């Protein structure tokens, strides 16, 4: 499932959100999926022997909170894919 599809699935199924809540949740889910994809790529490279690459470093506390909020939203609204939302274990 593509990033946009998963984001639409999760945020789109939430009822009774104001437009501002919808945008906030959409940003949170997007942030989680973006960083998760980046770290997954880095882990793959590191397991292949390339130790010169680094995992994602949060740009701010706000971004870190969005990451955590996005993960929670995904876990609550898409529990069948819960293992997908475990943050990448750094090697």
Image (cartoon, grey):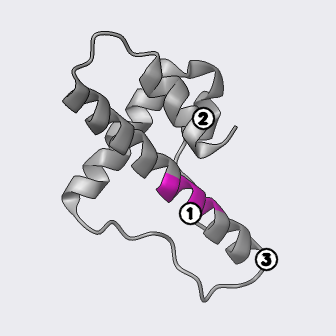
The image shows residue 52 at horizontal and vertical percentages of 60, 89
Query: Which span of residues is magenta-colored?
Result: 34-40
Q: Residue 9 or 41: which is nearer the viewer?
A: 9
Pointer 3: residues within 10 angstroms few (<14), some, or many (20+)?
few
The residue labelled by disc 3 is 48
Q: Residue at x 39, y 16 (%)?
A: 14
Residue nearest the viewer, comparing 70 with 11: 11
Q: Is residue 8 above or below residue 80?
A: below
Q: Secondary structure at mark 2?
A: helix
Residue 60 position in % (x across, y down): 23, 64
Q: Earlier in the sequence, mark 3 or mark 2?
A: 2
Residue highlighted by disc 1: 39
**Residue 62 locus on image (x, y percent):** 21, 54
Disc 3, SS = loop
Q: Residue furthest right?
A: 48
Residue 35 seen in render: yes
The mark closer to the camera, 3 or 2, is 2
User: Which residue, as the protein is rendered here, is positioned at the far front?
Assistant: 19
Residue 73 location, quadrant: top left
Front residue of 68 and 2: 2
CA separation in Å, label 1 and label 3? 14 Å
Measure the alpha-carbon separation of dots 1 and 2.
Answer: 20 Å
85 part of magenta stretch: no
| Label 2 sits on residue | 5
Q: Earlier in the sequence, mark 1 or mark 3?
A: 1
Q: CA distance from mark 3 to mark 2?
A: 30 Å
For the point 64% across and 28% down, the residue is 81
- Say whether residue 76 is visible: no
Label 1 vs 2, first from the N-terminus: 2
Magenta-colored segment: predominant secondary structure: helix
């Amino acid at each position: 499932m593509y990033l946009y599809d998963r984001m639409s699935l999760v945020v789109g199924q939430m009822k009774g959100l104001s437009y501002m809540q919808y945008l906030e949740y959409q940003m949170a889910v997007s942030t989680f999926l973006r960083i998760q994809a980046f770290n997954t790529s880095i882990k793959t490279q590191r397991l292949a022997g390339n130790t010169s690459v680094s995992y994602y470093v949060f740009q701010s506390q706000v971004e870190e909170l969005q990451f955590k909020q996005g993960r929670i939203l995904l876990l609550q609204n898409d529990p069948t894919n819960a293992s997908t939302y475990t943050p990448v274990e750094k090697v």
